[in-house]
Amino acid sequence: MPNSSEPVRSRSRRTLSSWAGAFGRFLRDFLIGDTPGLFVGAVVFVGLIALLTHSSTPTAVVVIAVPLLVVANLLVSVARAARGNSRGGSEVKRDQLRGGFSDGIRRVTGTD
């Protein structure tokens, strides 16, 4: 007599795999998004700060380094974005900005 729970296990395994894949795509989009440079910079800076904290570096140096690293990361990101837009990079069209949040939700969901 065949085991009747086999199709249920297979279906639940596919569902779990589907959810895990969707969650992975969400995390990648949430953390990295359109600017992977910011994500990489943040990870590198957290690592540097951890190394500075656990070494014999004075606390004042770490406290000063944190905001400087964040500002440097943002300046590099803004400079790269400015270069990208001057070369015909992607721009937000004015009609995409009209209407506010609720109009954007209506456009995405297709409801009026």
Image (spheres, helix red, strand yellow):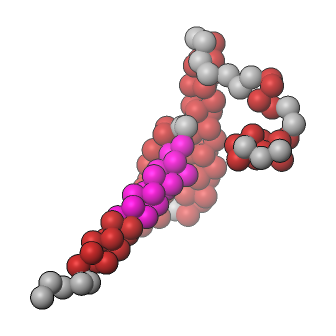
Q: Main secondary structure of the magenta part?
A: helix
Nearest the viewer among 63 and 108 is 108
Furthest residue in direction front, as rendered: 1
Asked if residue 27 lies in the magenta stretch, the reply is yes
Q: Is residue 55 visible?
A: no
Residue 102 colored in magenta in the image: no
- x and y, in percent, of residue 105 in the image: 76, 47
User: Which residues make up the magenta segment?
Assistant: 17-33
In the image, what residue occupies the spot 46% across and 60% down? 23
In the image, what residue occupies the spot 80% across and 25% down?
A: 95
Q: Please provide percent x and percent y for residue 66.
A: 59, 53
Q: Quick one: quadrant of the N terminus?
A: bottom left
Query: Residue at left 15%, top 84%?
Result: 2
Q: Quadrant location of residue 4?
A: bottom left
Q: Quadrant of the C terminus?
A: top right
Instruction: Count numbered badges in the picture.
Output: 0
